[in-house]
Image: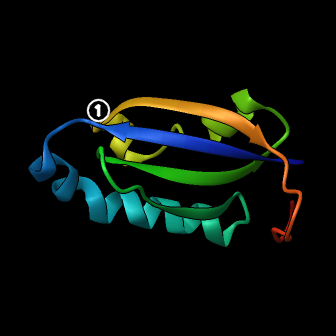
Amino acid sequence: MAAFAVQYTYVDDASRVATFRPEHREHLSELHREGTLLLSGPLSGEPGALLIVLADSAEEALAKLDGDPFKRERVIADRSVREWTVVIGQLPGA
């Protein structure tokens, strides 16, 4: 398993983001409990977030996030994924 940094860019509609945020966070909390999602949180500036996911490939990392209500409700305008090699420090499970 490798760690992947997934960046979400949200639509520019704070009300829409707020409407689906509780369901989004519950879904991500479930992925965290099962060990798929290591870290997640909003980014400053443009509306979006950074998620650290364990997977065997970039495609699998995105597939693991496909059930996110933000994706279903088209709150995510764009998402990108890159493998992340931790050099200093340690991530559990990575």
Left or right of residue 9, residue 31 in this image = right
Tell me if residue 76 comes above or below residue 92 in the rendering: above
Q: Quadrant of residue 84?
A: top right
| Left/right of residue 90 with respect to residue 82 in the rendered view | right
Reading the image, the residue beneath label 1 is 74
Residue sitting at 52 percent across and 51 percent down? 50
Nearer the observer, 65 or 17: 17
x 81%, y 68%: residue = 91
* Residue shown at 31% from the left, 50% from the top: 45
Say if 51 sits above or below 88 in the image. Answer: above
x and y, in percent, of residue 4 in the image: 72, 44
Q: Position of residue 26 (x, y in %)?
A: 42, 67
Q: Quadrant of residue 31?
A: bottom right
Taking the image as shown, residue 18 lies to the left or right of residue 48, namely left
For label 1, count other residues whose C-alpha is less than 10 Å away and answer few (under 14), some (14-19) or many (20+).
some
Give the residue type at disc 1: Arg
